[in-house]
Structures are given as structure tokens and as C-alpha cells.
Image: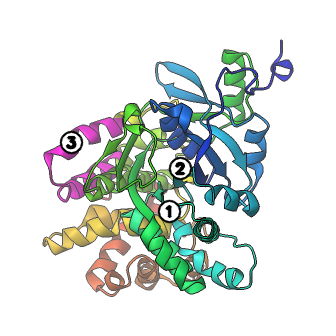
């Protein structure tokens, strides 16, 4: 039987039963499915916790997943081979623009948790929805939609719930809280007060490399599983989830799947943001400048790897506490990044740089300089981005117009303008500007052929 004649994955193929919707998710994408949906599937009480997942900008993912009644195949890809699992924790997939259904679910008393994977940049976009809310029109951003849903929950007297941010932001629970309360306060002061009293905002650190799915992945699932899945997700075997905060209406037993609940999440957030995500940013820009397309390829380049290791050395000085296990975490990252069967594309990682670098490079650079050191390795992360955007002016970024304006300048003036998009104070320090500029010159495409170890 050819792949085209295979049965389509649906709940008639899998014995999975639909659990009641008790979790609403905003930002239906591959990472959500490899992480929060996987953890919920593996919770000991998973039969009590179904997820309704809403897309962000486009309805496509919901349409494909809805045709499979929420089911998808998770492919854990290791150097030793693939492992396949049908995940059934998503019991409803919907277009994010379907505000009627979102409001209905958020107003339901049994809904206890809202999880978010809306990208780092989306937390700063909610102000655009205030005029729409005031005019009685439908909001267009995830936080605006969440505020409208919480208003319906208040009006229905449906009780408290938890909002759980799963995006790569420091203190992401408070970032979500501030974003939601900012919109709510401008729209309805009484609603803001209700949210303060009834919604908890949980901070998390999430970790599972999940590249984009390809047609070859669809074919691999068909060949190995005997059905056609139009929405499989490929991920690494490793997974990590650290959470801090209250769940006033309950939650799944995610700890059964390895989730960790802590009082102080900041050290774990910094470990992830600096060591994993920071290394990704270095590899994304330096790797592409040196002709690589995937994380594994870039890591195998001694110049790129040295840049990563030196940044890790700087960042590790500011990650105190044996409980973080930094040496083991670094060793595990090298193994994970080197998994050549996970084609984690550098172009995907490179997007939204001004948001990401503000969290990945700037804190380490500031900490190093406060300690009396130059901070060259953290500065290099900014430098390779500066060199890269000179060659890729169309790179997706929330400040793309400002990046384009900076690119019209030359020399240290350009470097200073780019640095100002990340940290205006550092951009006013001539020593920092000179350092970043000097390091960016070393990675400029015209000089790549002669990049030395000292330049990396």
C-alpha cells in the first residue's frame, strides 16, 4: 500500500479517548505539541485533562490537526533511530481567530489552566488591542484575546485559573501578568482588579529542541506506522520543564513525566536562556556567515564551537549553585546539539533577534563588565548578529525597520545604532561599541576565509 492510500490518523486508528477540556492553549505549533501536550499525555491523570489548542496568526495548523481529531505522531529522533508515539492530549484544535469558542472555553468553570507559546515578541503587542476592545471589536493578539476571555470568565463567575507562560523570557510569568494587566487596565479597571485576585501567573523554563517538520518526516511516519499523519512533530529525546507558581484550580500531574516545581525559577531560566538559547543565537549567525545551515553543522565548526564554549564560560560564572548542575548541562547540550538527525535550521533560530539577544547576551555582558571583565564572548554574540544582518536585511524581527535604518549607517555608528536596539545604555559606552564593532568585523563575510581562532 502506498503512502497515499494509507488510512489517515484519527481516533478511529488510535484507542486514545478524549479527555474533557480543562486546559486552553494559545499558540498551537510544533513546540507546544512536543512539550506541553507530551507532558500532559504522560501525566498520571491525563484522562482528566484535555487541551483545546488555538493557533496564532494562521488557521492552517488547526485545520490539519482538527481533521485528525487532535491526534498527531511524536517522533523522538536520536542518532540510534526513531521512536514513534501517538499523542492524544489535544482534544480540540481551533483557529485563534475563533473568539466565540475561546471565550466559551475560558468562561467554563472546569477550565483550570491557560498555557502560552506565543513567541517572545508577542508579549509587547497587546496595546494594539485596547482600541478594539473599547470599541467592542475582536482583539487580534494572543494577550488581547486572553483578556477578552478572562472578562467572560469574570462575568460567568467561573472562578480562578492559572496562566502559564512557556516562552523563552526571563520571569515569563510576570511578563505575562504585566502584559495582561496592562491591556485589562486600559480596557476595564474592574476587570484588571478581578484578574489580580483570581488569576495566577506561573513562570516556567521549557526545553526541548523541536525543528520544523518536513515532507520526509511525513513519509517516515507513514513507512514506520502504517498510517498517514499530516501533522507529525519531530523532536529530541531530551525534555525539561521547570515551573514556579500556584494553580488555584488544579493542574495535571506533570511531575509524573519529569516536570520540576520550584520556589525560585530565575536560576533555571538563566541557565536555559544563556547556555542553550545563547549558544543557539551564536550558532545561528556565526554559522550562517560561515556557510552552515543546521545547528549540528555549525557546532562541528571549530570557530563556532569555540565561540559557544567561551560564552558558556562567561555565563557560567553567573549561574551559582550546585543544584543547577551546570557542567553536566553543558555536556548534555553538546550531545544534543551534535545530534545530526535533528535538522535544527539556523535560519529558524535567527528570527526575532532583537528580542532574543536582549535576554541572552545583554545580561551576561552587563554582569561581566560589572565584575571588571571585558565580556568579549557575550559581545561576540551581538557582533555576529550585527555582521549577519548586514547580509540579510529582510530577517524577521519586531524592530526590522530600525535594523534597516541602522544598516544605512557605517562603521561604529552602525554598530552603536544596532546595539541601541538591545540596550541604549551600553550603546552609549564607547568601549562596548568598539568591542562589538571589532568583533563584528572579524565575522564579516569578506573576511570569513581568514577568520582565526582569536577572532572567534
Quadrant (top left/top right/bottom left/bottom right) for the C terminus = bottom left
First in sequence, mark 3 or 1: give its number: 3
Q: Is residue 108 visible?
A: yes
Q: Residues within 10 Å of mark 1 (few under 14, many from 20)?
A: few
Q: CB of mark 3 within 8 Å of CB of mark 2?
A: no
Residue 141 picture location, percent across and down: 64, 69
Q: Is residue 442 visible?
A: no
Q: Give the residue number, with chain letter if any, for mark 1.
A: 446
Q: Is residue 145 left or right of residue 382?
A: right
Q: Nearer the viewer, mark 3 or mark 2?
A: 3
Q: State the CA–CA distance, disc 3 to disc 1.
A: 40 Å
Residue drawn 58% across the image and 75% down it: 125
Q: Main secondary structure of the magenta part?
A: helix
Q: Secondary structure at mark 3?
A: loop
Q: Residue 195 versus residue 3: which sits nearer the camera?
A: 195
Q: Residue 272 versus residue 199: which sits nearer the camera?
A: 199
User: Furthest residue to the front?
Assistant: 157
First in sequence, mark 2 or 1: give its number: 2
Q: Is residue 2 left or right of residue 91?
A: right
Q: Which residues are magenta?
A: 305-334
User: Furthest residue to the top?
Assistant: 1
Q: Give the residue number, with chain letter if any, for mark 2.
A: 346
Q: Give the residue number, with chain letter if any, for mark 3.
A: 325
Q: State the CA–CA distance, disc 3 to disc 2.
A: 27 Å
Amino acid at each position: 500500500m502506498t503512502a497515499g492510500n494509507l488510512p489517515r490518523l484519527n481516533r478511529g486508528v488510535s484507542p486514545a479517548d478524549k479527555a474533557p477540556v480543562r486546559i486552553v492553549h494559545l499558540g498551537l505549533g510544533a513546540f507546544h505539541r512536543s512539550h506541553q501536550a507530551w507532558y500532559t499525555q504522560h501525566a498520571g491523570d491525563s484522562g482528566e485533562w484535555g487541551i483545546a489548542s488555538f493557533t496564532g496568526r494562521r488557521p492552517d495548523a488547526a485545520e490539519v490537526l482538527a481533521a485528525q481529531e487532535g491526534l498527531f505522531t511524536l517522533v523522538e529522533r536520536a542518532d540510534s533511530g526513531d521512536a514513534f508515539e501517538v499523542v492524544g492530549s489535544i482534544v480540540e484544535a481551533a483557529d485563534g481567530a475563533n473568539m466565540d469558542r475561546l471565550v466559551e472555553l475560558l468562561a467554563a468553570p472546569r477550565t483550570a489552566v491557560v498555557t502560552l507559546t506565543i513567541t517572545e515578541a508577542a508579549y509587547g503587542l497587546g496595546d494594539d488591542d485596547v482600541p478594539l476592545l473599547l470599541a467592542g471589536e475582536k482583539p487580534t493578539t494572543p494577550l488581547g484575546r486572553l483578556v477578552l476571555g478572562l472578562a467572560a470568565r469574570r462575568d460567568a463567575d467561573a472562578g480562578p485559573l492559572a496562566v502559564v507562560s512557556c516562552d523563552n523570557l526571563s520571569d515569563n510569568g510576570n511578563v505575562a501578568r504585566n502584559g495582561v494587566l496592562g491591556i485589562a487596565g486600559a480596557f476595564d479597571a474592574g476587570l484588571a482588579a478581578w484578574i489580580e485576585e483570581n488569576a495566577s501567573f506561573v513562570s516556567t523554563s521549557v526545553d526541548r529542541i523541536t525543528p520544523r517538520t518536513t515532507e520526509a518526516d511525513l513519509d517516515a511516519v507513514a513507512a514506520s506506522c502504517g498510517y498517514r499523519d499530516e501533522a507529525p512533530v519531530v523532536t529530541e529525546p531530551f525534555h525539561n520543564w521547570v515551573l514556579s507558581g500556584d494553580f488555584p484550580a488544579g493542574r495535571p500531574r506533570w511531575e509524573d513525566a519529569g516536570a520540576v516545581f520550584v520556589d525560585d525559577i530565575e536560576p533555571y531560566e538563566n541557565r536555559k536562556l544563556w547556555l542553550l538559547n545563547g549558544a543557539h543565537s551564536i550558532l545561528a549567525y556565526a554559522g550562517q556567515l560561515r556557510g552552515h545551515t543546521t545547528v549540528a553543522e555549525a557546532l562541528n565548526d571549530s570557530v563556532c564551537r569555540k565561540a559557544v564554549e567561551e560564552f558558556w564560560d562567561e555565563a557560567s560564572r553567573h549561574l551559582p549553585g550546585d543544584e543547577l548542575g551546570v557542567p553536566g548541562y553543558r555536556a548534555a547540550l553538546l550531545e544534543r546539539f551534535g545530534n545530526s538527525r535533528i535538522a535544527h535550521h539556523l535560519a529558524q533560530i535567527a528570527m526575532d533577534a532583537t528580542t532574543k539577544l536582549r535576554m541572552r547576551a545583554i545580561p551576561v555582558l552587563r554582569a561581566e563588565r560589572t565584575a571588571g571583565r571585558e565580556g568579549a564572548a557575550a559581545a561576540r554574540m551581538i557582533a555576529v548578529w550585527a555582521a549577519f544582518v548586514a547580509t540579510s536585511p529582510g530577517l524577521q524581527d519586531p524592530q526590522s525597520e530600525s535594523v534597516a535604518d541602522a544598516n544605512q549607517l557605517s562603521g561604529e555608528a552602525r554598530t552603536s545604532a544596532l546595539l541601541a536596539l538591545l540596550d541604549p545604555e551600553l550603546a552609549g559606552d564607547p568601549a562596548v561599541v568598539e568591542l562589538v564593532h571589532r568583533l563584528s568585523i572579524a565575522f564579516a563575510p569578506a573576511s570569513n576565509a581568514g577568520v582565526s581562532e582569536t577572532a572567534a
